[in-house]
Amino acid sequence: MPARDLAPAPATGGEADELATSLDVRVLRYSRVWEDHRLLDAALALDGDSHVLSICSAGCNVLAMLLSEPLAITAVDLSPVQAALLQLQLVAIRRGSARDVRRLLGIDPALPADRLAAYAALRDHLDPRTRAVWDERVDVIAGGLAFSGRLERYIRGFTGDTLPDYVPGDALRQLFTLDEERDRRAWAKRWLTAPGLEAAFRAWTARDTMAARGRDPAQFRWVSDVDVSGQLWDRLRWVCTELPTRGNFYLHAFFFGSYGEALPPHLSDEGHARLAPLVERVKVHVGDLSRLLGERRPGTFTHANLSDMFEYQSPAQSQDAMTRLGENLRGGGRVAFWNFLVARAPGPEQDALVRLDALSDELWRRDRSWFYRAFHVAEVAR
């Protein structure tokens, strides 16, 4: 597989570069995507003519969208390590079975030596920059790549070390067997009101604690006057009661650091069989999304999955980026993104982006990943 622009991009100026220079892009920040792919499926409605521009992150939603068989996906990220994670998965999907991929990622049970052997079998098929990233991080592969990101290790610091003092493992497992909302509410009343649990959760998810240990201080630049831990506590209670828990692999991964009985679609045997002939449709680019848009002919991209990127920009910068998206995306296409802690949405000046607020709110209420304060969908009116 040819190289995919994994060299760090040159500076472009502006606040995107300020984030890039203040954020340590050598860190594997996310080894899984914590954004519900079903929201993207419903929001974007991809087809065979779609060319998707997507934030790369850990690659999970790039691969989930690829199951819709779009014409192409261009995945972009400031971090060469995040880009290399997607590249590794693309090569693994192309050259191995679904079980091989899951063993490589540490999802199916395997010894560290088995994971390293799986990597060794792929190593010569990686482009040089991707290979260099993982040659420097073989200990991460040996330890189980799928839940080894900075954020995933931070989560396990609470759910693995602190949560069992309040909610035993058997009780957590019971939650995933409750199909009736009234039973889940009774479960939450019994277990999520354990004395001291909410205080422990709030301490763990406090803004400064999360910035120092789970994310990065640079990602909190525009977070102010937000009850971070309160928002997360309310959303956790919501997903444990108001939404079905059986098969919610996001919630299972949060509590247990594993997917349990349900898998993301791209990791299933069926999903793997469909993805293998499609991986060449994905191109990976390291650099700034706005610069990439400026380098491509207007109308190249039909849809965009932008994760929660706008909250790392000032209000003016995010509005400018949305204006550029409206000018560059093909008419009739759609843009989807989340707000984690900072409210960002197209304003009146982005007249090329028509907000679909009813759809956005409906989908957000079904968000199984639960962390986010809002989900936004907008359509390109041209």
Image (cartoon, grey):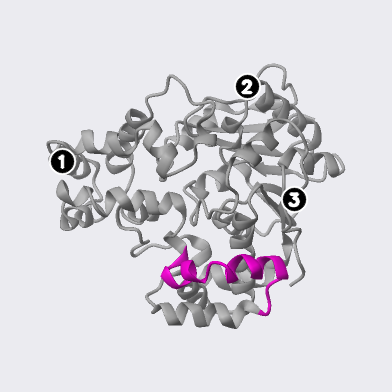
Q: Is residue 233 highlighted in magenta?
A: no
- Residue 150 in the figure: left or right of residue 129: left
| Residue 152 visible within the image | yes
Q: Is residue 129 magenta?
A: yes
Q: How many marks?
A: 3
**Mark 1 packing: few (<14 Cα in 10 Å), some, or many (20+)?**
few
Q: Name the residue at 47% across, 30% down.
A: 341
Helix, strand or loop under label 1:
helix
Reading the chain from its start, which is encountered first: label 2 or label 1? 1
Q: Which residue is mark 1?
A: 186
Q: Earlier in the sequence, mark 3 or mark 2?
A: 3
Q: Which residue is mark 3?
A: 51
Q: Where residue 329 sits: x, y (%)? A: 77, 38
- What type is the residue that disc 1 sits on? Ala
- Label 2 crowd bin: few (<14), some (14–19), many (20+), radius 10 Å: some
Q: Is residue 256 above or below residue 14?
A: below
Instruction: Assign the N terminus to one quadrant of the image.
Output: bottom right
Query: Which quarter of the image is occupied by the C terminus?
Result: top right
Whether pointer 3 and pointer 1 mark residues with C-beta atoms closer than 8 Å, the reply is no
Q: Mark 3 or mark 1: which comes first in sequence?
A: 3
Q: Note whether 285 is above or below 40 in the view shown.
A: below
Task: Identify the residue at the far right of this view.
Answer: 297
Query: Can residue 268 be seen in the rendering of this structure?
Result: no
Q: What amino acid type should be assigned to the residue bearing mark 3? A: His
Q: Which residues are magenta?
A: 124-145
* Residue at the extreme top: 348
User: Which-is-in-front pick, marks 2 and 1?
Assistant: 2
Q: Nearer the viewer, residue 358 or 224?
A: 224
Residue under the image location 59 percent in, 59 percent down:
63
Q: Which numbered circle lies on residue 315? A: 2
Q: CA distance from mark 3 to mark 1?
A: 45 Å
* Amino acid tagged 2: Pro
